[in-house]
Amino acid sequence: MLLNRETSGTRWRVRPDGPPKVTGRLAYLTDMSVPGMLHGMVLRSPYPHARIVSIRTEKALAMKGVHAVLTCEDVPGLNRFGIAHPDHPVFCEDRVRFVGDAVAAVAAETAELAAEALKRIEVEYEPLPVVDDPEFALRDDAPRLHEHGNVLHRNDYAFGDVEEAFRACAHIVEETYSTPRQMHVYMETEGGLFVPEADGRLTVYSPTQHGLMDRMQLARILNRPEADIRVVSSPIGGSFGGKDELNVQPYGSLLALATGRPVKLHNSRFESVRAGLKRHPMRITMRTGTDASGKLLAHRVRVVSDAGPYSTLSAEVLNFAVEHVLGPYRYEAAEVKSVSVFTNNGMSGEFRGFGGNQAIFALEGQMDRLAEKLGMDPWAFRRINLRKPDDPGPLGQPIAPTDGARQVWEALPASRLWREKERAAAEAAPAEPWLKIGYGAAFVMHGAGLGVGIPDPAGGRLTLTPDGKIEAAFGYEEFGQGLIASLEQMLIEQFGFGSADLRIVIGDTDAVPDSGSSTASRSTSMMWQSLRRLRAPFSSRLLGAAAEALRLPADRLRLGEGGIRDAASGELLLAYGRLAELAPEPIVCETSFSYPTSPVERVGSHYLYSYSSVAVKVEVNTLTGRVRLLDQFHAVAAGPVVNPQGYLGQIEGGSGMALGFTLMEDAVMKEGVYLTRNLDTYLIPTIAELRGRFEVLPIEGLPEGDEHGPRGIGEIGSVGLAPAIAQAVYDAVGVRTAKLPIDPEALQAVPDFESEEVEPA
C-alpha cells in the first residue's frame, strides 16, 4: 500500500500519546516541579581553549539563598562521562577545551539567584591557541588537546589492488564533499528534576535514550551502587540522538545530593546550542572510476570527521561512515582511510543517521557524476553496480540475505513522480523563466543496530498484573517516534488483546528489563522480536490458567479483547482481572537476547540492512538561489510494516530533518566560538517548506526463512534526501554542489533569460 498524508485503513490507529501531546496536556520530564526544590545552573567556559589558573567560589557561596557551589573537587567518583569512551570531564580540572565546558555548578532558591551566583564565581583563565580545523589538528605542529594527541580514532579498510584498478579505468571522478554541523533542535532542551529520596536513593527525572546506561554512568560519578539510583527517562520532547549521552544529569545529581533537596535544571536554548551535541561535520574526498561500460572498478575514500573536544560516540560514527561510503555497490578494489579528530569546536556526537547521511551524500554524488561522464542514465548506472542478494556486506562481512536493493531500484522508475519526470521533458517551460524545475534520485543502504563488538542487548517482559492488565515492560524510551503506539499495535495484532487491556511500562530503570538503547533503528525491531519470543509461552500460561479455572480444555480457548474467549464463538468466558485472581501463581514471562550481528571480528560492521530509493522534484529560483522541494517519493524495503501511521511519520519526519541538512542548517563557528547562538540565526524547515507532495512505498517482503522481522526505519528516511536534491538542482540549473547546505549564491549565477525583459511579480 502506498502511504501518504491521505492514506487511511483499518490498521491506522490514534496514537495513545497523541491527544495529550497535541493538546499540551502531556507533562514532559522538564516540566516537573516539586515544593521546596532548588534551581541548578552550570558555569561554562567562555573560551574554546584555556588553562584554568584558579577558581574562587567564596562570593557565590556567601549569597543568601545559594545552597551549593560545586567544582571538580566535589565529585566523589569518576570525574568523567561518555558512553563508550569516558573522557568528558564533569567539571574541568585544569583546562577547558570548548566553550561549553563545565567549570562549576550552583543550586539556589530561584533561577534568578542561581544565575547571579554564577556571575560571582571567579575563574582566572589563561587562553591557549585554538584548534578549530581538523586538518590543522592533524599536523605535527598543532597544539595537543589530549595527552595522546589529537587523533581520536582511525579506521581504514581496503581490498583488491586499487592502483591497478584505477589504471584500468576509462572514467574517473574525484570530488571533496563537505557537510555541516547540524543541530538536533528538539523542542524540549536538556534538563530534568533530581530528587534525593528519604531512603537515601536518588531519583533522576531526565530525558535520555538509555536510562540504564545513564544509571551506570551516574553510579561511577557519584560513587554509589547502581541500585541506589532510579532513572525515569520518558516521555521525551525529541532527541534524534542528541540525548543519547549524559548532558545535565551529573550536575543535577551532584547538586541534589550535596543539598539534600530536589534540584531542577533546564537548559536555555543558548545553553543547548553551546553545550549540546551536533552532527559531525565531515570532509569526504572520493576518487572513483569505471570501465567503458560503466562497471565500477576502483573507489578510494578519505574521511576526516570533526569530533570536537571529547569522544562521545565519534569513533563509532566514523566506523559507520566507513561502512557506508562503500554502500550498496560492488567494486573490483577499494580503499578507505578515515580519521576522527579532536578540535576546540563544539561537541559532535550521535545524530539520526549516525554518519550515514554524510557518507551517502558523497557516495551518491559520485554515482551521478560518473553516470554523466559515461553519458548514461544515473539510475541505470546504479543498477549495473548494485550488490546482489547473496553478496557480503560493504566490509566483506556476512549479512542477512535480502532482495531489497533490487526491489527499491525497480520501484522508483514505476513511481508517479518518476513517470511525471519523463512527461515533463516534453512539456513547455514555465511562465516564470527564473523558476527552474529539476528531478533527482538517490539510493540508500542503511545498517541497523550497533554492530559487531558493541554490547547490544534486547528483551522485554509480559505480566498479567493483579488488576487484570497485560503489562508490557521494555527498557526503551518514547521520544516522539511512536514507540508506544507500535508496541500497542503489535500486542493487539499478535496476541488479540484490546487496547484497554494493556499497560505499557517504559523508561523507568526500577520497572523495566534491559532492552538496550533506543537508538540505531533498533527499538521497534527488537520489540517485535521480543513479542515473537514471548507469544507462545505467555499465551500458553494464560490459557493454561484459564483452562484450569474454567475446567475446559485449553484448545477450546483463545486470548481476546477483555479476557479469555471461546475459540469457536468468540464469547467472553473469563475477564483478565478475574483470571489474575484465580491464577495459582503470578503469570510473568521475560525474554533476553542480543541484536543479531555478523560472525566477524570487525567492530561496527552490521548484519541487518534496510534499502531505500528516493526521488524528488525541486524548484530553483535563479533570482534568489533558493530551492523549494515540491514532491518526494520514498521506496523503503525494511520488512513488514508494524504501524502504518508511524511508518509514514518516521519517513516524513526524517525527510524534514534531511531537508534542513541539505538547504539551510549549519551551526556556524569561528575560532571555536558559535556564531549561531539561538534559533533566530539557525533556520530549520517549517510547514511552509514541508507542504509538498509526499509518498512512501513500503516493500514488506523478506526472503523465505528470514526470522528477523521488520527492520527499523527511524533513520533511513533522513539519509537519501540530500543527494537526491543535489542531483535535482543539477538537473534544473546545471550546477553541481559538493558542500551542504547548498549555497544559494551558487545558483543565482545561472539564469538563462534576459532579466531586463522580465518583471516578476
Image (tube, rainbow, N blue to C red):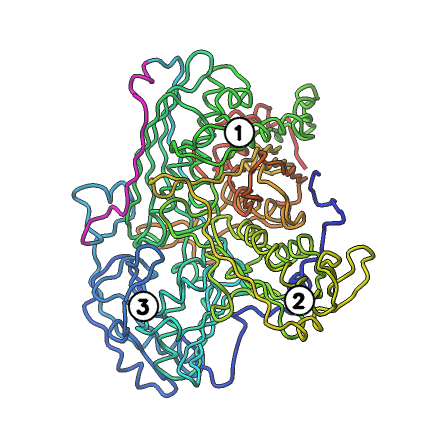
Q: Quickly name the residue at label 3.
A: 220
Percent of width and height locating residue 452: 38, 44
Q: Examine the rendered structure and indicate whether residue 413 appears above or below residue 236.
A: above
Numbered marks: total: 3
Identify the image quadrant of residue 574: bottom right
Numbered tag placed on residue 16 in the rendering? none
Q: CA distance from mark 1 to mark 2?
A: 62 Å
Viewer can see residue 244: yes
Frontmost residue, 572 versus 320: 572
The one of 361 and 319 positioned closer to us in this rendering: 319
Q: Which residue is mark 2?
A: 545
Question: Magenta part of the protein: which range?
Answer: 147-167
Report whether 85 appears left or right of 29. Answer: left
Q: Position of residue 484 (x, y in %)?
A: 61, 59
- SS at mark 3? helix
Q: Characterize the local packing of mark 1: few (<14), some (14-19) or many (20 or more) Cα atoms within 10 angstroms.
A: many
Label 3 to label 2: alpha-carbon separation: 44 Å
Q: In the rendering, at what x and y percent does residue 429 appear?
A: 67, 24
Amino acid type assigned to the residue bearing label 1 in the image: Gln
Instruction: Indicate which label's residue lies in the foreground, 3 or 1.
Output: 3
- Amino acid type assigned to the residue bearing label 2 in the image: Ala
The crowding category of the residue bearing disc 3, from other C-alpha atoms within 10 Å (few below 14, some 14 to 19, many at least 20), is: some
Q: Where is residue 186? Give x, y as percent.
A: 52, 58
Q: Residue at x 52, y 63 (%)?
A: 188
Q: Report which residue position mark 1 lands on.
A: 727
Q: Earlier in the sequence, mark 1 or mark 2?
A: 2
Q: Nearer the viewer, residue 45 or 153?
A: 153
**Residue 323 forms part of the magenta stretch:** no
